[in-house]
Image (cartoon, rainbow, N blue to C red):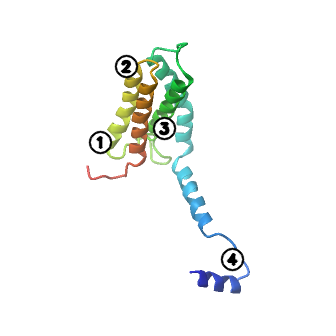
Amino acid sequence: MEDLMRSISETDPLVDSSADLAAPVAHRRYANALAAWPLRRRMAVALTAPVLFGLMVAASGGWAPTSSPGWTALVAGAALACATTLATYLPRPGTGLRPDLGCTPCAVVAAVTVLASFGLLSSAPHDVSTAVLALGVSAFGLVQRLNNPSTCPA
């Protein structure tokens, strides 16, 4: 491969032989990931995350003087993961108004993790370990949704 590039660069003055061939591949990976998330989904995350954060705090008993900054950060992370999970259901541009469900059992599991996060936070208000568990559950739902193939064996 190197010999081929060397021979091309010697014969073609427009080819820069000093260019790193791995950089465009890495750049394309991130560009493809960004292109996979249309603007409507990114906007949905930006608008939904603060609303879900407020609802999660309210479900956990509201603001308390005893709540730690760690608990607040964990609940904010769970709200962000839940908002991202919900944004994956928005249809892609040009596909109509039908939600992007993918595999139905997988779609249901991801949606249930959003509700489970609320349930966990309301079960033990302002408890850091419960907030860690809620973040873990919401992260599981997000990973489940992002790894969901268009068709699965289920």
User: Height in image: 103 above or below 63?
Assistant: below
Is residue 58 placed above or below 79 in the rendered structure? above
Please name the residue shown 53% across and 52% down the image.
33
Residue 12 lies, in percent from the top left, at 70, 83
Tag 4 or tag 2, which sits nearer the N-term? 4
What secondary structure is found at the residue carrying circle 2?
A: helix
CB atoms at circles 2 and 1 under 8 Å apart?
A: no
Label pair 1/3, CB-CB below 8 angstroms: no
Disc 4 vs disc 1: which is toward the camera? Answer: 4
Which residue bears the numbered disc 3? 84
Classify mark 3: residues with Cα within 10 Å, few (<14), some (14-19) or many (20+). many
Residue type, mark 4 in image = Ser
Q: Earlier in the sequence, mark 2 or mark 1?
A: 1
Q: Secondary structure at mark 4?
A: loop
Q: Whole-Å distance between the Cαs marked 3 and 4?
A: 42 Å
Residue sitting at x 50%, y 46%: 93
Percent across and percent down for residue 20 are: 65, 69
According to the picture, the residue beneath numbered tag 4 turns out to be 17
Where disc 1 sits, the SS reads: helix
Image quadrant of residue 43?
Answer: top right
Q: Amino acid at mark 3?
A: Thr
Q: Which residue is mark 2?
A: 123
Query: Would you call the spot at circle 2 few (<14 residues within 10 Å), some (14-19), or many (20 or more)?
Result: some
For the residue carrying disc 1, how many other residues have a C-alpha within 10 Å: few (<14), some (14-19), or many (20+)? few
Residue 141 on image: x %, y %: 39, 38
Q: Give the mark nearer the N terminus: 3 vs 2.
A: 3
Q: Is residue 8 above or below residue 148?
A: below
Q: CA distance from mark 1 to mark 3?
A: 19 Å
